[in-house]
Amino acid sequence: MNAITIAPLLLGLAAFGVVRYAAKVKKPSLERARGLETIFENASDAAIMNDISGFVRTANKAFCRLTGYLPAKLIERSIFELAHGCTPEELARRWRTADHGESIVSAFQVRLQDGSTIPIEMVSTPLRQAGEPLIHSVFRDLSNRQKMGHGPGAWSFADDLINIMPIPVFYKNTQGLYIGCNRAYEEFKGITRQEMVGKTVYEMAPPEIARKYDEMDRALLQTRGIQIYDWVMPDAKGIERSVIFHKTVFTQASGEIGGIIGVMLDVTERKQAMAERIKHEQQIQQVQKLESLGVLAGGIAHDFNNILMAIIGNADLAQARLPIESPVRHNLQKIHAAAFRAADLSRQMLAYSGRGKFVLELLDLNRLIEEMIHMLEVSISKKAVLRFNQFNPLPMFEGDATQISQIIMNLVINASEAIGEKSGVIAITTGCMDCTRQYLQDLCLDQSIPEGLCVYLEVADTGCGMDEETKAKIFDPFFTTKFTGRGLGMSAVLGIIRGHNGGIKIYSEQGKGSSFKVIFPASSKQLELLDRAQMSSTWTATGKVLLVDDEESVRAIGSDMLRELGFEVVTACDGKDALLRFQEQPGFRFVILDLTMPHMDGEQCYRELQQLKPGTRVIMSSGFNEHEVSQRFIGKGLAGFIQKPYTLTALKEIVSKSCM
Ligand SMILES: Nc1ncnc2c1ncn2[C@@H]1O[C@H](COP(=O)(O)OP(=O)(O)OP(=O)(O)O)[C@@H](O)[C@H]1O
Ligand SMILES: [Mg+2]
């Protein structure tokens, strides 16, 4: 037994002796009683004897030394007058109901004679003197245990060790009163040890949280094992921190459970890093998924477009060549319409692959939307109101007008479908903003969008909104919650955004609505807006044209169309063949050149043509090819692009705009 356990015992005996002496109860000799009284008086531990209401009957020298009070000032004064952080009624109740010989441990702050306070632990033992209940209490100065005379060994070592630990540590007694903590805890909570000792968790945390702590502590004291759990709590600055509590019970030298010791591991940064890693991995997965599916979708779209080219072109030509009153016209219109729907599907797939971008130009979002507004109005539900809030002046950005229109169309149609049969509002808003890295990191598609000025387009609706599951899958190709949906709209939107180095942010609340914000980096280039409305109506389709395509069906229908417009057509089946024809027969007005061909592709053929005859007008045509990157041709004097499958009208438009 060491000094810590012997001291209260001796003091208890001494006090017991004093009581018996004072009560003049039979035997023990006067000498023995005096001896015990001397031990009590001179014990190095501070001790007092008080009645059940807390009034001090006697106090030893160590208590007077500790508190600075003269013995006369203490007698008949309530111990509760000096105590802070304890509940007198509760303590008195426990004194009254304690079992014989049971010690009651409590911790609180004692006000010293000089006005300062120190944290103490009080071990009270109820006794009886001539039938009257009295309480004998021994005090331990928690602020500086060494001075209390428990020896420099164990306590000092443990204290120093706990204090040097960079992890917050705290300890409580079995009654749930804090009895100490280390420096890291003081720093974490922004509270001093003196301030926390003697307090219960109810004085340290909001009631509902304190109740949970209390329940956990009680469970631990019962099971006496180890408790580990996650928690979120504010630090000294009020910032929420994620911590992991590791708690266990500690045993006193007497072998009894002394209370709980806990360690708080701050894992906020670790959690944040993990969340970022998961997000990054998800983004990589998304990109990989996009890439593999994109190649597939693009490949299908490419072949599909060549087939559609033949269908649409032939239907177009047949209509043009039929007399107005022909009953077959109606059927041809149906073929045309169905082929167009198929082309639309193909366009969505191509967009999803992110490589269907052909004509990059400086775009004004406001103007683009204005041009589309009528078409949008007729496409949405009758119950939906379309609003357009435009920000002016809006910086330009580089994009493919057809594809950006596809984004707007898909978003607006989705918004209308989300509103359904109810009344609602679809708001299209444009604007520009300075995007920080932080903001850009939160986008659904994190790629190399440079920090700085961006233009945005927001489509918000008051429709059904989305649950978390839908939000998570919204960009998955073929994911749809609609009976007739194809689940390609949003995947196409994502592909286009990706191809334009943009980003998208989605906000949605179930039952309230959704908003989709699409962001593109603003262009630093000067406004060179191509006037798309400007189209010569006076041009004449005469002269010789070279049509180059490896697909026989495309060559056939393309030639037919060009002839229909009034041109004389020469065809070639690949790049090499094209160069031969070009050299054989001079005087071509322009060349329509397929990008993907065997032997010599469109890009190389284009270069060779420019060498043979600089300034040769070339319209690049393509269904899809994975090497197609429009930027390759920027600044190289390409006359235009036409995407397969094309109609007679589209061909006429591009030829008139680019080559006349
Ligand atoms: N504005 C919106 N409000 C609520 N849910 C939406 C909205 N936009 C998209 N969604 C959800 O995302 C899913 C995928 O949208 P997506 O446009 O890709 O396919 P779809 O509209 O179902 O079919 P389609 O290929 O014809 O566009 C939708 O089925 C719907 O559940
Ligand atoms: Mg859709």
Image (cartoon, rainbow, N blue to C red):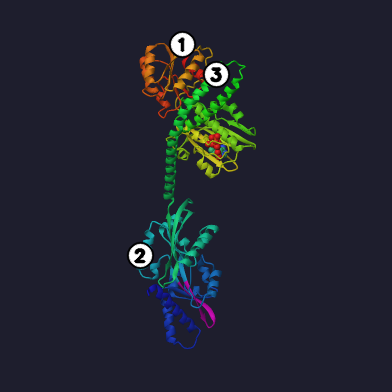
Work out whether residue 198 can be spotted.
no
Residue behind mark 3: 318
Q: Are marks 1 and 3 in contact (CB under 8 Å)?
A: no
Splitting the image into 4 quarters, where does residue 166 fall?
A: bottom left
Q: Nearer the viewer, residue 472 or 130?
A: 472
Work out whether residue 72 can be spotted.
yes
Secondary structure at badge 1 equals loop
Q: CA distance from mark 3 to mark 2?
A: 99 Å
Secondary structure at badge 3 equals helix
Residue behind mark 2: 157
Q: Nearer the viewer, residue 501 or 304?
A: 304
Does 605 lie within the magenta span? no
Secondary structure at badge 2 equals helix
- Residue 600 spot, x, y in % from top left: 37, 22
Magenta region: 123-138
- Residue 373 spot, x, y in % from top left: 58, 27
Give above or below for 274 relative to 201: above
For discs 3 and 2, the disc positioned in front in the rendered view? 3
Q: Amino acid at mark 3?
A: Ala
Q: Amino acid at mark 1?
A: Gly
Residue behind mark 1: 543
Q: Nearer the viewer, residue 477 or 367?
A: 477
Q: Amino acid at mark 2?
A: Phe
Q: CA distance from mark 2 to mark 1?
A: 101 Å
How many numbered discs, if any?
Answer: 3
Q: Looking at the image, which residue is at 53% across and 42% down?
A: 470
Give above or below for 235 relative to 135: above
Q: Earlier in the sequence, mark 2 or mark 1?
A: 2
Splitting the image into 4 quarters, where does residue 366 fall?
A: top right
Prevailing SS of the magenta stretch:
strand
